[in-house]
Amino acid sequence: MAGILYLVATPIGNLNDMTFRAVEVLRNVSLIAAEDTRNSIKLLNHFEIKTAMTSYHEFNKYDKADYLIGKLNSGEDVAVITDAGTPGISDPGEVLVEKCYEAGITVVPVPGACAAVNALIASGQPTRRFLFEAFLPTDKKERREILESLRNETRTIIIYEAPHRLVKTLEELQEYLGDRELTLCKELTKKHESFIKTTLSEAVNLFVENEPRGEFVLVIKGKSRALIEEEKSQAWSDISIAEHVEKYISSGMTKKEAIKKVAEDRNIPKREVYAETITL
């Protein structure tokens, strides 16, 4: 009978956030797959956990996943932990979980700390709908595409950032999103934990003058639907309704399709558009 893969969340700073269940699981599994064994040994020693460890990180996540699947298929239980927080959330784990499902191996989450969720609930920003982007990609083309996709995002946006890249990221976010409201969440659960509710422009000014320190979670307020509709209307204010319809017809739409699209763009009834385009 195959073993069980446990995804065990660990503290993101304060060791008192470790759960009793997490300690029990880590003591009882046959093997712990850790993102960085040098970092995790401190955690295991603190809780007197003697279980053997093996490294499982971004650079060996495919080959090592096959090794771990072999262990699980032989009947051993395996736990995955990261340096801090929940496995699979901007940390190794996703590939192994997928392979477990392909192999019919049971996956069990052991919940605990997650920086994104803790930042969100303490941010003072809307929490009902949110979008987690983790760290923005370093590839310039992909990064631009992601930022462009966030331009009209109405959900609260959560982004992770390191201190040495913070100012650049804040400047790019302001460029693409406008001067959006956000909360800067720093060093969550640690001694210097702080929450700064501000705007993107004010945040840029703050950290241009004061070098940022510590790890940050940016919780950015979504764009209001009312503003999106207002911007849509303004985008077409320089041309007439008839010219607007003509523009879509010239792009290949039928007149009926163009009238429907113009009504959507201007948020007006189709009959109003039709009345302005009878001669077309």
Image (cartoon, rainbow, N blue to C red):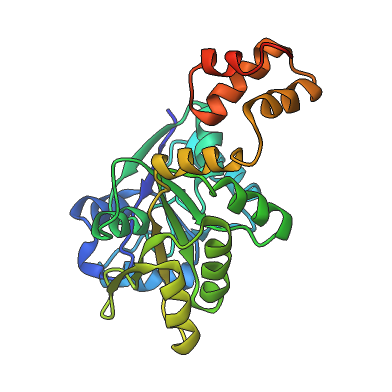
* Residue at 29 percent of width and 49 percent of height: 126
Camera-side residue: 279 or 88? Answer: 279
Q: Which x, y percent locates residue 222?
A: 40, 49
- In the rendered structure, the answer to whether residue 133 lies left or right of residue 125 reads right
- Disc tally is 0
Answer yes or no: is residue 26 visible: yes
Position of 107 relative to 42 (above/below): above
Q: Is residue 228 left or right of residue 118?
A: right
In the image, 134: left or right of 191?
right
Residue drawn at (53%, 48%) of the image = 150
**Quarter occupied by the C terminus:** top right
Residue 89 x/y as whole percent: 45, 50
Q: Give residue 203's position: percent from left, percent from top.
A: 42, 74
Residue 115 lies in what quarter of the image?
A: bottom left
State whether residue 77 appears in this view: no
Name the spot of residue 208 as percent of width and height, x first: 50, 84
The residue drawn where x is 42% and y is 28% is 1
Asked if 205 appears above or below 97 in the picture, the reply is below
Measured along the vertical axis of the image, is residue 240 above or below residue 180? above
Along the line of sight, the residue nearer the viewer: 38 or 94: 94
